Image (tube, rainbow, N blue to C red):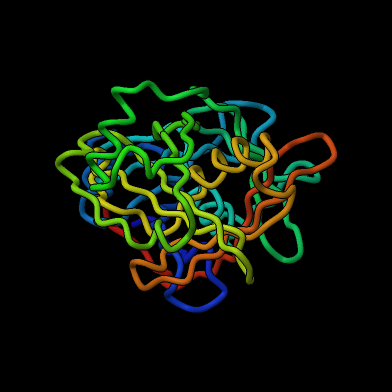
Amino acid sequence: MRSFRQVDVFSAEPLLGNPVAVVHDAEGLEDEQLAAFARWTNLSETTFLLPPTSAEADYRLRIFTPGGELPFAGHPTLGSAHAWLEAGGRPRGERIVQECGVGLVELHREQGRLAFAAPDRLRSGSVGAEDLARVADGLRIGRDEILDAEWVDNGPGWVAVLLADAAAVLSVWPDPAALGDLAVGVVGIYPEGECAIEVRAFVGGLGVDEDPVTGSLNAGIAQWLVGNGTLPAAYVASQGTALGRHGRVHVASDPDGVIWVGGDTRTTITGTVAL
């Protein structure tokens, strides 16, 4: 039996964020056992805490969707760090250092919330006409409704598109079959209010049609839209509205230009799991 926690991420209100299943002390498990448990939980991500292989890291994390393993994902990073700390984990230095498929990811606590440093993008730059046409078809919108687009892939394969406003994002009704294995993020700006943007994430290729609240996508969007001046250096993003969630992603760029992506975390389930 292994210790288990399910952590709700990116909402200060109970049951309105994005849950991640976290298995502690996962060494000794085979890859197929990890994948099978992720399919069984049927959450967007399930994670497994392991001893680090790097002397700089506090722990190693493997991240699985129902469709396979990811080198990095945001809400699992925050939720797993929360679970690790709650179980008695103590960082070696001032910051928590997570080892995962993209390398080492730093986390800190800011205003009571955990936040991770956005990793470097594996792919960035403009999106080709063929891919844009596929995205537009998959979102069931006209190509002219996409104001801008960028590859913002930091692991899951994200391509992000900017629509006219937040209302346009919330009105999207995608065709999962047309999107296929594309991981598509959709963003629109609010004219005023608590949140600067509304975000949606469509990742059918990973076994999840729409992810409720997505740290990796928000990290890539911030690197893109803060980087080009569309968004301010610090803001709050809303995500999950279309799914009845109340996700809030807190983004801030530090003086060195590092994007920090944070949110509230709370444990909703504790127990043990037999694998």
- Give coordinates of residue 73: x percent, y percent: 47, 42
Vertical position of residue 194 compared to residue 64: above or below: below
Residue 262 in the figure: left or right of residue 11: right
Q: Is residue 232 above or below residue 9?
A: above
Report the label total.
0
Residue ID at (19%, 46%): 176
Q: How far across and how far down the image is residue 64, in percent?
A: 34, 42
Relative vertical location of residue 201 with respect to residue 205 in this rendering, above or below:
below
Asked whether, in this view, residue 52 is left or right of residue 175, the answer is right
Q: Position of residue 121 (x, y in %)?
A: 55, 27
- Tell me what residue is drawn at x 52 percent, y 27 percent: 102
> 259 and 84: which one is in front?
259
Q: Quadrant of the N terminus?
A: bottom left
- Would you say 175 lies left or right of 71 here? left
Q: Between residues 12 and 252, which one lies in front from this camera angle?
A: 252
Q: Is residue 30 visible?
A: no
Quarter residue 241 falls in:
bottom left
Q: Residue furthest front?
A: 144
Residue 119 image offset from top left, x and y in percent: 60, 33
Q: Residue furthest bottom?
A: 14
Q: Is residue 200 visible?
A: yes
Q: Name which residue lies at 72% across and 66% down.
A: 112
* Residue lying at the far left of the rendered structure: 177
Compared to residue 200, the image places residue 5 above or below, namely below
Question: Residue at position x 58%, y 52% from top?
Answer: 81
Looking at the picture, tell me which residue is in the foreground, 27 or 117. Answer: 117
